[in-house]
Image (tube, rainbow, N blue to C red):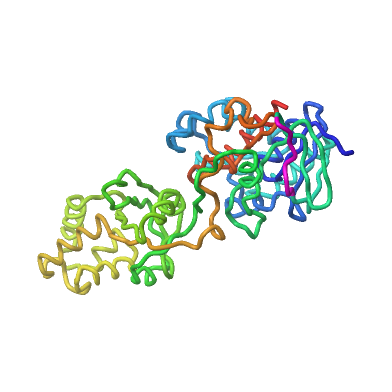
Amino acid sequence: MQTYHLIVIGSGAAGMMAAICAGRDGKRVLLLEKLPMIASKLKATGGGRCNLTNTLDNETFMSHFGRDGRFMTPALEALDHEALIDFFLQLGVESHAPDGYRVFPVTHNANTIINALKQEMHNLGIEVQCSQKVEKLLYDEDKVTGVKTKSDIFYAQSIIVATGGMGYPSLGAEGDGYTMAKEIGHNIIPLYPAMMPLKVKETWVANCRADTIAKVEMRVNIKKYKKYTAKGDLIFTKDGIRGPVVLDFSREITPLLSKYAEVPVLVNLTKGMNEEHIRQHFKKVLKQNPHQNTIDVLLTLLPKSVALALCQLANIDPTLSLSKQKGHSRDTLYTLLAWTPLTINGHDGFKMAMITRGGIDLKEIDPYTMQSKKRKGLYFCGEVINIDGPCGGYNLQWSFASGYLAGKLQ
């Protein structure tokens, strides 16, 4: 009979961190991964650059997760961004924050992080078995006792479920952890794909694919949801929008698309300028050269492809000067510049989702230990729990911190 102090299911950031923490405390640890190799999703994170964390203080960091952010307090007190940076430094991995905010390994290569974690697990004698999909948790009335895979049964005093979410099924995400949690009696908050590109109904966006618009603000144009906003860079695609602002905004949009066939949004493309600011800006530009045509004036705010698209929407001739445009068309142009309407009508589902919104109900997990309130000896950490944040190192920091807390308390 194969018996361990701890079995960790899943070899992402949370799972490996949990295994290492328990191993450092002298526990006999088994890490099970259903894919042929470990850390497949971690390898892809941040476009392969691995945005580990960010430099925000804990209070500000948690505020970006909404009302559930406070749940993270014990985990972040155990391993905040400074402690995480130091953890990797002790493993020989230097990191930096080139923009003063997002923290990367200096190599900007996720393999640097993965190799360091693998080496530390090897040094600690942690047993890693790949191609071992856990089919069932074993438990009695009081606590968990082990796991059953397709080919084996393993027994342990504690089990940590760190299986991740549903995003990128090609990298092994199938929702295994939710199935295990349900079987124990846990409630699963509805799951939605998040941090992903979005599709729009408007066809003009296809003409603007070559350009990135910086410092865009987006907001939902439904009265009940006007508080949903996001800021960041925007990229137009053949049939939709992407970029950092969209990745963040999609966390709010995908649940709305389950209620509405279409979600109208407004997009400020002019770095926060309102209609009056835009008018005053154009006056200054024209004062320097009164004979400029409309497109040249617009190019002081927008890339040409976007400027031409907005001219067409406003029924404006871009070759004429602003003073020669019809008054109502000029007013329409100012309105479009301040808040361009788009209609979000779809997405590509979990296959393109970097994270999952929803998961195991926070009310059923002890935030001080990450232990299940339904069954002793069962712990959850990382994305499988109902916590998700924006892009910028938030979700990886949470995974490492929650894994650290769960593993440390074995």
Residue 139 visible in the displayed image: yes
Residue 219 place in picture, x, y as percent: 32, 50
Residue 98 visible in the displayed image: no
Q: Nearer the viewer, residue 15 or 280?
A: 15
Residue 386 place in picture, x, y as percent: 53, 40
Magenta portion: prevailing SS class: strand
Residue 25 place in picture, x, y as percent: 78, 26
Q: Nearer the viewer, residue 285 or 193?
A: 193
Locate residue 203: give its quadrant: bottom left
Report the span colored magenta: 134-141
Position of the N terminus by quadrant? top right
Q: Is residue 211 above or below residue 30?
A: below
Position of the C terminus by quadrant? top right
Residue 103 place in picture, x, y as percent: 57, 41
As for residue 136 lying within the magenta part, the answer is yes
Q: Residue at x 53, y 42 (%)?
A: 102
Q: Residue furthest front?
A: 141
